[in-house]
Each structure stands twice: as C-alpha cells, then as structure tokens.
Image (cartoon, grey):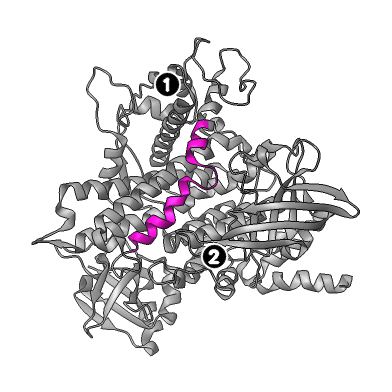
Amino acid sequence: MTGSADAVASVAPLAALAPLAPLSTEEFIAGIEAAAARFDAATYPQRELPAEDWAVLTEAGVLLPVLPAEYGGRDSHVEMCRVVEVLAERNLALAVYTAVVTGLALRPVVLWAGEEARREVLPLFAGPLAPTAGFASTEPGCGSAMSGLTTTFEEVEGGYRIRGRKHWQALSATASWWLVVARRDGDDGREYGWFVVERGDGFHTSHRYEALGLKVIDYGVNDIDAFVPAHRRIEVGAGNLSSMVDIYLSGRALIGALACGFLRRVAREARAYADARRIGRSPLSAIGFVRYRLEAVDSAHTVCAALNHHVRTRLDLTSDLAPAFASIQAVKIVATELMVSSANHYQQLTGGEGYRSGSPTNIAAQAFLDSRVFTIFDGTNDLLSQQLAQHCLDRAGRADGSGSLDSSGSPDGWDGSDGRGLSAFLADWAPTAPAVSAHGLDLRFLDGELGQEHLVLAGRVIAYTFAAARVLEWAAEPAPTPTAGPARRPRSSRPTSSASAWSSTSWRASGPVTGPTSEPGPAGLSRASHQRVVPIPKTWESWAMPKKRQRPATLAEITAALPPVEYWYGEGIPSPAGRTEFTDDDGRLWRKVRGPLHRNLARRLVTQADELIVGEGAGGHFRHVPPADRLTAWHEIKDRLHADEAPSYHPYEFASMDGLLTLLYIEESC
C-alpha cells in the first residue's frame, strides 16, 4: 500500500465516528445505553456475538474511551468504566467482552507501543466496523504462576519468531489482533516480551472450549507460530514478570464497574420478583428470611457501587496502575465474591424458575452461570487474597527487616516479632484505617503466625476492611457535579498511591454522614437529590475479635437498611412504573426493561419506540400517543422530567413479552 493510501485508510475510520467526539459524557453514555438495549440478557440469544452485532456497539463508540484523541478516541478513564457498567446491567457477558478488548488488549498498546505500531493498529478500532482484540497469557500448563510460561520468542531478521500454545483466552477463535506474552528462548525465563500479533501472522485456534456461562464469548486453545515485525514489540516496564502486573490490574479494576451494573439489575429484579410472587395472600417478600436475602443483595450492590466510585474517581486506567496494586486486588476480591453470592440469593429466591434456562420471569440461572467464573479468572481470589496479605505484611515490615519472600519464593509466614502486628498496621494504613477506626475493628487475631492458608483468609479480611472504608468515603462525599464534556484526566497524570488518596480525610465523626444514594444510572441519570443517611457504627463484620462492650449494628445491617433507589407511587399497589410488568388497556402485557430513563435516552425513544403511553394520574389513566403527536407531547412534558415538584414525569422502557415491540411509558406523578 502506498503512503497516500495508508493515510486515507487511517483517516477513514476517524471520520466515520466523528459525530461522537463533541458529545458530553452523559450524551455519549446515553448513546451506549440505547445501542445496548437490543442485547438485554432476558431476550438476547445465548450464543457467540456475531460480527454484525459487535458492529452495532462499535458504531455507538464502546471502544472510543480507551483510544487517544489523535486516533479518533475520547481518551476517558471515566467513560471506560461507565461503558462497562452500562453494558453489565444489560448483559454481563457483553460487558466482559468489551472490557477484554479495551482494558486488556488495547490499553497496553495505547500506553506502551511505539508510534509505528500505534499508527498501524489503533485507527482500526476507532471505526464503526472495528475488529476485536484479545490478551494471550494463560497456557495449558501455566495459569496464575506465570513463571511457568512456555511460549517463547527469538529475534530473527526484521522482527521476532513466537512459538507456543495458549488457552482460555476470551475471543480465542474470533479476535483479529492479540497481545501475546512470551519469554526469550534459551534465557531461562529471565526476560519476557509483549507482542502485538495479527491472527494472520500465525495465530491459529486448534480447539474450542464450551464454557458454562458467558456464552457471548468464545474460548479455546490457540497455537502460535508467528513472525512479528520488530516495531510490534511493546516495552512494558523492565521486561520481567513484575511488568505484567499493570496489565492484569486494568482488567481487575474494571470488575468494579462490572459488579456495580450487574448487581444493580440483580437487586432490582430479585426484589421485583419477590414482590410479585404470591404465597397465599401475601407476597414472597413478606417472609423474614426472604427479606434477609433481598437486603443482602442490596448491601452487595451498595458496596460494589462504592468500589466502582473509588475506581472512577481515585484511579486512572489511562496511566500506570501499579501504585494502586493493593486497592485493585481488594476491589476484585470483594466485588466478585459479592457478585457470586448475590446471584445465588437471586436464584434461590426464584425457586424452580430460577433453575430454568430461558425463564420468562427471571434471568437468575444465567446470572449465576455468568457470574460464577469471576472469582476464578483473572487470578483466582485465593491467590489474590494471599498476595494482598503478603503485600500488607511487607509494607508493615517483616521480622527480618527484608520485606521479601523466603528463598523458595513463597511466603514463609510472619509472627509479628518486630513488635508491630498486622492489626496495628491496618489501623494506621490509609486505605483501611477509616473502617478500623469507625467500626472499632479488633483485628489482633491477625497478629499470630500466618501460614499460607491463614494468609488467604487474612487477605480477605483486609479486602473487606478496605471495602468498608470505601463505603464510608462514598457516603461522606457531596453530590457529584455533572461534567460538560468527556470526563478525562491529562495523560501526563499518574494515579497516586492508595495511601495518598485518603491523607486529607478525617474519619472522626461519631454521628451519621450523608451522601448521594447512587452513582448516575445506566443512562447517566444523577439522583443527587436523594440523600441517604449512613450511620457510622463502632464495629463491623463478625470476623472481628469480640470485645466485652456491646456491639452496635454491623456494616451488612447498615447497608441492608438502605432503601433501594426505586420510584414508587401511591400506597399499597404500585403503579406500572413500580412493577416489573403490567397490562395496558388494550390487553397487551409489557415487561419493564429499565428506568427511570435519562432525558436523552427518553428523547430517542420518543421517535424510536413502537408505542408511547403517558400514565396520567400516577398511571391511573393511559393516554396512547400516536406517532404524529409524539413530539408535541414530548415538548409539553420534557421540562418536568424528574422534577422535584408536581407534576413530575418519569420515563421507563418496557418491552412486549415476545421482545419484538418497545414501549416508552412516561408516568405522571401528581
């Protein structure tokens, strides 16, 4: 290809999505939400994602936040998180699919590839027909212990020859581009390299795996015998295994957004199912232990929303994440465990219907299968917990003063004989100190000798203490201020260490603190006008060592007591907006998809939805609006959307039970 042809090829994708560049973050996310509607887990087939469906998402711009502006992107850490959160509420597997392409495959190219490789690869992903990309590290004989890597590279004329076998890569058989990890051949594994490989270079899928969940994503075994041009080797750190940490951290950080979106839906649908299911003359939700399960799921969503908020506001995926190692390990541990436990609660609440594939009343079976793998992939939680505990022990200072592992490279335990126990360190360490202080945590049981099994458990204690501190921090923050354009940080900025993020915060309040009830919803709806009161108790969680004084409420009880952010009207019987489904006056049954909607998304549906109904008088009377009158009706009510005073209007999206028709339902609150 000639130089002029190269220039035309690189400019064409940028021009195709140019209209998305000037959009504000809220407008951009509303477009993502609109595109994601067709992929809802309740109706979208359990199958690998076809190329034409991926094109729907890339045309909406799902890849743009990770790309620099000079390559047609939006260069936004916040939008990377919000895109994943929006998709996870609709379809968890689809969110993972997108996070793999952005967080694991493209981000390292953006940060560390040379200019020639960036010019070759990045413009391809800025267009509406963008390909997919994956990250290849795991091997049949090498999972979390990357020191056992057998894929090798050697320098040859003009580049590198890479040979080896990988497996369990997301998008194994479909991704066109790969970031491949290999060690130098004959170098005893001391030097590692990262290479941008095109499938046609010699990347072949020899066998496909059938995964239990996440059916949108294909997995398998990949054999590599590829020649890679020299310019496609990317320089990640010092070229040793520690350099790989940052690449993995980006995927783990995005799990906060995945969990937040996923659990928002699980909490909403579990409660709606329990309210609608009748046991005799009472709803299922009237049973005490059912309420416990519902509150556990609500609590999980609150905690994960706080973790997601921390990632969005304290970290930066467009920069080096290594200083945030401990924070991101904790996010992954807590968020994934809460995803699995909440999916289990959801499935238990739905009974036999929750064990039914394709149930018309719930997505519990799919939610459980899709979420189960999260504590396993991207580093098993047992391993990450052990690493987190060891990290804190090293920070605290080991007995021998070395702060290192033993000669075998494995944790050799720690007996606290330097005079400073792990509990004292956690009480002073900024990421955990607020929770230890506010809840009066007695963690002295961590000060004994810690074998490998105890390190795993200690790591979980540390992770949940970190999460408790993030809930306190989030509750204390003022309501967010909407941004006027793409939310981004200068690329020159670097995230500070976890400790510096909390250095200016005082946690001595003995009374309640208030904060916004939730992050902006999937369409960017900020509910800052709603305030929650979060009491700060003296203790938290049952694993803290008992004291003689009486314990106040635990964090689980506190967060469980927080009401879900739902709109209910009237008394006793909820309006259509408060139900999961309703029958209109024409006898058609509609199932709620989402809502309340952001005004930008509602405006799109005014013209795109098959039906528009205004529920006047809190849904007491249905006014069917014909297509010719929709814009007039919209102009009459748009200024009263989500108004604080009556009349106020709240838009919702519903779908027919066969999934073929869309209804925009706008309810009037008097």
For the residues bearing labels 1 and 2, Cβ distance under 8 angstroms: no
Q: Earlier in the sequence, mark 1 or mark 2?
A: 2
Residue labelled with disc 2: 28
Is 185 displayed left or right of 463 in the figure? Answer: right
**Badge 2 element:** helix
Tally of numbered discs: 2
Q: Residue at x 57, y 70 (%)?
A: 54
Residue drawn 30% across and 79% down? Answer: 613
Residue 168, how many percent across, how many down? Answer: 58, 54
Which mark, residue 446?
Answer: 1
**Foreground disc of the pair 1, 2:** 1
Q: Give the structural element (helix, strand or loop) at label 1.
A: helix
Note whether 198 is above or below 510 in the view shown. below
State the image coordinates of residue 358 (x, y, percent, origin top left).
35, 69
Amino acid carrying mark 2 in the image:
Phe
- Is 443 drawn above or below residue 48 in the view shown? above
